[in-house]
Amino acid sequence: MIADAAGGFLKPLERLPAETRLVVSRDRERLCEAAPEADVIFNAEFRDPTLLFDTFARATRVRWVHNLAAGVEKILSREIIESSVPLTNGRGVFRRALGEWAVGAMLFFAYDLRRALRSQGAGIWDRFEHEELHGKTLGIIGYGEIGRSVAEHARPFGMRILALRRNPERAAGDVLVDAVYPSSQIDEMIAQCDYITVTAPLTADTRGLVGSRQIAAMRPSAVIINVGRGPVIEEAALIEALESNTIRGAALDVFDVEPLPAGHPFYRLENVLMSAHGADNLPDSRERGGEFFVENFERFENNQPLQNVVDKSAGY
């Protein structure tokens, strides 16, 4: 297991079969030493993907690789992509928190909570009009596990929900959405939306998917929310739209560069709500990731199909 030995995801691993030999380390030499005997590699390292690359290269008998996080764009080396060894990820494990955060961001803008907090801090009795989410149109770019969680949380507010999906037919009959669009119709979908939530993974196809043309298609009153991956939105075009107030605002949990550099425009813009890639940072987040691995390990031991197998060619 490529991880800090003090990580909170280790407790669930106590349920692994007694005969399981578990090596937990971030030390490259120790990992490479253990690799030839490894049947499974559990990657919980987010900062240095080369630890996985070097371990995998020496793991001659490995039969399964699991990534704690849902995003796999940083670990898809040529060797891993071309290997027949299945790769699984934490897709969906943290979906509920991300769905809640996205709806919370919509409420923040709908009820102008920044103004309310500003007035409260200034000791001003400021009675102003706001709007409700009921009847508004929400567009979801990337209708996978996280996108569906956003829809599940938004539907009770009475929102009209549109979804953009690479394979629209996979959402056929989904009662949460009012319409599903292919990627080629992204501009058409965006133009209808009051709120747009980006939940797509980062791949060659999705990088810059929401660019200057798509942002220009947004309504002036629209808000864009990103809980997927930062580079899916073209950052320079988004900053320009926010600074010129051609769109209402943005709520961002992910960014092109993380940590976000000091002095970045997002810190000062009043029409931006941001968090430090922590929308799913719950007290038990890592433990949940460990629980999912243990469940999948049981399937592995019993020769059952693994859950969350990544399509390595597609990138998610």
Image: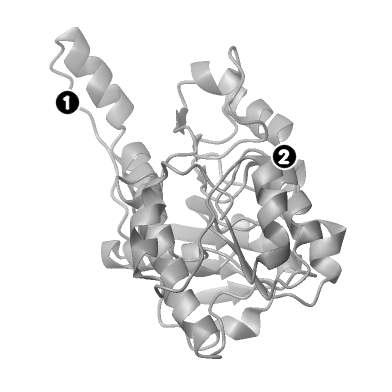
* x, y percent for residue 227: 51, 48
Residue at figure coordinates x 63%, y 38% from the top left = 47
Farthest residue toward the top? 122
User: Which mark, residue 234?
Assistant: 2
Which picture quadrant has residue 234? top right
Residue visible at 43% across and 39% down?
Answer: 278
Q: Amino acid at mark 2?
A: Glu
Measure how far apart labels 2 and 1 are at the Cα level: 36 Å
Identity of the residue drawn at 68% across and 76% down: 63
* Residue 120 against residue 49 in the figure, above or below: above
The one of 249 and 45 positioned closer to us in this rendering:
45
Discs 2/1, front: 2
User: How many marks are shown on the rendered structure?
Assistant: 2
Q: Quadrant of the C terminus?
A: bottom right
Please tell me which residue is depicted at 51% across the width and 19% down the height of the picture.
Answer: 267
Say if residue 70 shows up in the picture: yes
What is the three-letter code of the residue carrying label 1?
Arg
Q: Which mark is residue 127?
A: 1
